[in-house]
Amino acid sequence: NTIEFTGGLHATIVKQVQLRNMNSSTLAYNAILVGRDADDFSLPKGNTVTIPPTREGFINVEFTIRFLHPAEAVLILISNKVDGANGATLTFSLKSEVKSIDPLGTMKCRSPCYEL
């Protein structure tokens, strides 16, 4: 699965990954960000999520678009044993795309075109 972060340059985008537990046991996951631009992505609410039986849990991924080139990373969710249950390891591809460039401000200046 791919999670896309699209927006304007310098925008901060938060995506929420929904995890469902269909088991009768509690599941817990540790999240890890890896890849070329992994340092540009963050997990603002922590890197662990615990999901009660037959419920759902969420993990937030945050990204601030700082460059024009697309950023790429991978979110890996590794299961921890809780109540004897072990979930599957999950991976998500994270990609960014700049959709617009809005100026942060404008500046006026006067200067001669050239001097002899």
Image (tube, rainbow, N blue to C red):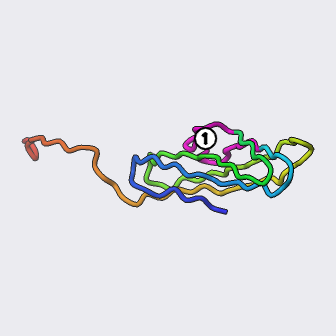
Is 48 part of what is drawn in magenta? no
Q: Residue at x 77, y 46 (%)?
A: 52
Q: Amino acid at mark 1?
A: Leu
Number of other residues with Cα within 10 Å of mark 1, as a class: few under 14, some 14 to 19, many 20 or more: some
Depth order, front residue of 59/63: 59
Depth order, front residue of 61/64: 61
Q: Residue at x 68, y 46 (%)?
A: 34
Q: How many marks?
A: 1
Question: In the image, is 64 to the left or to the right of 74?
Answer: left
Residue that numbered label 1 is attached to: 43
Measured as percent of width and height from the top left, residue 95 is found at: 57, 57
Measured as percent of width and height from the top left, residue 30 is found at: 75, 41
Measured as percent of width and height from the top left, residue 101 is found at: 34, 55
Q: Is residue 83 above or below residue 54?
A: above
Q: Residue at x 67, y 50 (%)?
A: 75
Q: Residue furthest bottom?
A: 1
Question: In the image, is 109 to the left or to the right of 70?
Answer: left
Q: Residue at x 55, y 43 (%)?
A: 40
- The C terminus - image quarter: top left
- The N terminus - image quarter: bottom right
Q: Which residues are magenta?
A: 29-47
Residue at disc 1, secondary structure: loop
Depth order, front residue of 84/65: 84
